Amino acid sequence: MDKFDFVIVGAGSAGCVLANRISSNPKNNVLLVEAGGSDKHILVQMPTALSYPMAMPRFNWGYHSEPEPALNDRRISCPRGKGLGGSSSINGMVYVRGNPHDFEEWQTLGAKGWGYRDCLPYFKRAETWTGGGNTYRGGDGPLGVSAGNGMKLNPLYRAFINAGIEAGYPETNDYNGEFQEGFGQMHMNVRNGVRESTSRAYLEPVLHRTNLKIITKALVNKIIIEKGRAVGIKYETSGKIFSAHAKKEVILSAGAIASPLLLQRSGVGSQSVLNAAGIEPVHLLPGVGENLQDHLEVYFQFHCKKQISLNRKLNLFSKALIGARWILFKDGLGATNHFESCAFIRSKPGLKSPDIQFHFLPAAMRYDGTPSITGHGFQVHVGPNKPKSRGRVYLTNSGANTPPSILFNYCQHVDDIQAWRQCIRLTREIMAKPAMKDYCGDELQPGIDVQTDSEIDEWVKKNAESAYHPAGTCRMGNTQDPFSVVDPTCRVNGINNLRVVDASVFPSLPNGNINASVIMVAEKIADSILGNPPLPPVDVPIRLPENWQSEQR
């Protein structure tokens, strides 16, 4: 049995951060175990190619949900990254921290020490913002964050923002800064025209460290737990079983799907789930695998009156030219995810923060990146960001290669259904403003025949898809809460020397894409693991929209 001080399972958005920070102390001998392989592939590194690695078994676990009752029993795709960088190597590269009130909510749910002012220093430590450091942004962190091409490549980006302003919403210069609400430029994890995964940002610079060992293509079967203490892992590679001993800690960073599965496979979870899977209980924690949350979204599509959309660039010849330019210069249409304008708005009065998010894309296409129309078009990705419905992740047997049973339970809460109705109607109102008049042709979907509550409900049931933000399945909270899985330092309740550090520990979903928050959590917990005092809270005001109790905008 190989012996290490720390064993980290999963080289994704959190695992790469932890491997970097923990191994910064040369006295710590660190093992990082990853089920996938290298992320060195042009389709991973080139931002515009983002739809391809997500469809490749080499880079994606390819999970699907059980039939979702409120979505016409459709099985919803749940891609999760496999390989160095994890989901940060296959995601849309959108950088959103969330709203300050999200982290205040975490505190009310039992995550003491995770208020916004506590988290902001770690968001700042992680990033190098292209605009330079300030009160809210970091200027010298490992993670490059940019504004893409600055919306210079297509006038539709600016038109969308102007439409939002005409609809009465504010313009925001930095939704990751003082105030999230409004329309503005989207930020992305792209540095010098290349995807900025956590593998590239955190792992590559420290590969030379002799106290950091990385094993790829190694599937972890279980955590070895002896007398209430995690002492190592068993993993399989090249058809053989190996063990690795952890003197200090085992850290699970396998993500919101795989981390609870690994706990359950190791005998940690609810009695009923373990019994049904034929697993001998080691430690009962009923919250393992529960509290699953995710963002849903739809594509609002329009014909474009002018021949300026990206649909003209979706043929093989144009793609080849874009790829060639990117290979040579790392710029142009190959160097962006094409989500260069966005918005965060409130759906109704009485909300302290936005609950609807827009990603604007100057093309009309399907989820696999192929064109959905003949001619020119564009689309708005939109969905509610604070769902109240909750699901679960269960293993079905002891086999490490057996797909999990995932049920998101989307749209089971009446408030989620109402939020969707608001999404559709508010989007239509915005897209009908004068700023879009020269561009906006026929509404392709939902289509003008979708108007009533019941028609909207049915269309959402048929068309909503995951935004790929699963979280919450090893919830952080007060140790007296029987359904919390980890304490505010991410230690698994009732088991020594075992932590979970990834999106599964989120008490609730942040308002936006989750990768930035996962990285922040890993940065913050790294200090706890190293015995460092937490960074001092940043004393900044947490703004509320003016007249938020009585006005929607």
Image (cartoon, rainbow, N blue to C red):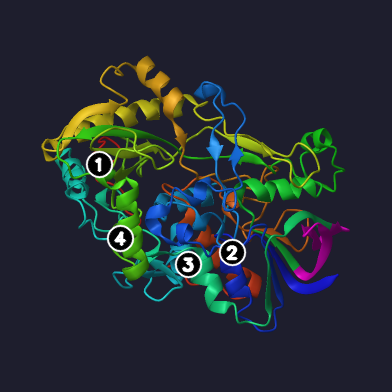
Label 2 neighbourhood size at 10 Å, few (<14), some (14-19), many (20+)?
some
Residue 191 marker: none
| Residues under numbered marks 2 and 1 in contact, where contact means CB atoms less than 8 Å apart | no
Residue 122 marker: 3
Foreground label between 2 and 4: 2
**Amino acid at circle 2:** Ser
Which picture quadrant has residue 334?
A: bottom left
Write down the residue under mark 4: 148
- Chain-order first, disc 2 or disc 4: 2
- Chain-order first, disc 4 or disc 1: 4
Segment colored magenta: 225-248
On the question of residue 413 being in view, the answer is: yes
Label 4 and label 1: CA atoms lie apart by 34 Å
In what quadrant of the picture does the C terminus appear? Answer: top left
> What residue occupies the far front of the structure in this picture?
317
Which picture quadrant has residue 431?
A: top left
Write down the residue under mark 2: 38
Label 2 and label 1: CA atoms lie apart by 51 Å
Residue depicted at 47% across the width and 67% down the height:
122
Label 2 and label 3: CA atoms lie apart by 27 Å
- Chain-order first, disc 3 or disc 1: 3
Write down the residue under mark 1: 547
